[in-house]
Amino acid sequence: MKFKAFSRLLIGACLLPACWAAALVLWDSIILSAGAVGGFTVEAMSLLGGIVAFTFCWMALSHPVKTYVLGHELTHAMWAIMFGAKASDVRISEKGGSVRLTKTNIFITLAPYFFPFYTFIVIIAALITYAFFRPLPCLALWMFLVGFTWAFHALFTIETLMQRQPDVKAYGRLFSWTFIFLANILVILLWLWATTPMEFASLSASIAYRLTSAYAMIFSSFVSIFKFIGSLCSQI
């Protein structure tokens, strides 16, 4: 195994407790958001409604594969441009797609799995509307569209990761999966913070507590294992 591949595997393994902590932080945040004023806001409920609506469409209708592939390749291109690369020759089909890039890195390669392209389009459209109409009209509708497009991103990402992807293989499956999981959880936490009465201080406290607890548990487990091995060796 090459050094880079081994180091990524090691980093991925080290990030597993962080993934567990992130899942607990998300649960804490949902509870905090609901309990802050006795329930979710209309905007948060609209966001949830959009997620549920697309999930129903996903189960009942055929999947819009070409739409996903288009967003996937455009996300590669957009992030490449952000990092100073050039993108060209975008190709789309129901079997997959491709885009020619002059350089790449982990963010460019894995961007489609953590960056919800169509949600980004909705947010940009909302910001343009807000520039001309204040307050933003039909905020609940905008939040519904955010939830709808994010569910599109999440479900297609899960389905795609269940298949063999060159993007994921490039940085190792374990490292890529942990990176993608943490990035997606971060996006959800930012939305909860922006659309609910949850305070940033509460979110920060939850993150600090869950991360500390997760890694402290792993450390104590390793200490116990080494002590047990040491006791066995002393008896030999």
Image (tube, grey):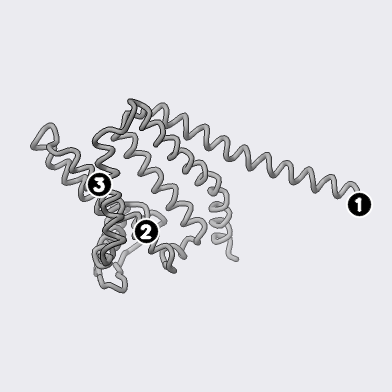
Left or right side of 3 for 130: left
Can the viewer see residue 19 in this picture? yes
Q: In the rendered structure, which amino acid carries the disc numbered 3? A: Val
Residue at image position (34%, 38%) is 190
Residue at image position (14%, 36%) is 136
Crowd tier of the residue under label 1, counting other residues whose Cα lies within 10 Å: few below 14, some 14–19, many 20 or above: few
Q: Which mark is residue 236?
A: 1
* Image location (x, y in percent) of residue 173: 50, 61
The answer to whether the residue labelled 3 contacts the one labelled 1, judged by CB atoms less than 8 Å apart, is: no
Crowd tier of the residue under label 3, counting other residues whose Cα lies within 10 Å: few below 14, some 14–19, many 20 or above: many
Residue at image position (28%, 35%) is 195
Q: Nearer the viewer, residue 102 or 21?
A: 21
* Image location (x, y in percent) of residue 159: 38, 63
Q: In the rendered structure, which amino acid carries the disc numbered 1? A: Ile
> Which structural element holds mark 2?
helix
3D distance between C-alphas at marks 3 and 2: 16 Å
Q: In the rendered structure, which amino acid carries the disc numbered 2? A: Thr
Q: Which mark is residue 157?
A: 2
Can the viewer see residue 81 in this picture? no
3D distance between C-alphas at marks 1 and 2: 52 Å
Image quadrant where residue 218 sits: top right
Residue occupied by mark 3: 146
> Which structural element holds mark 1?
loop
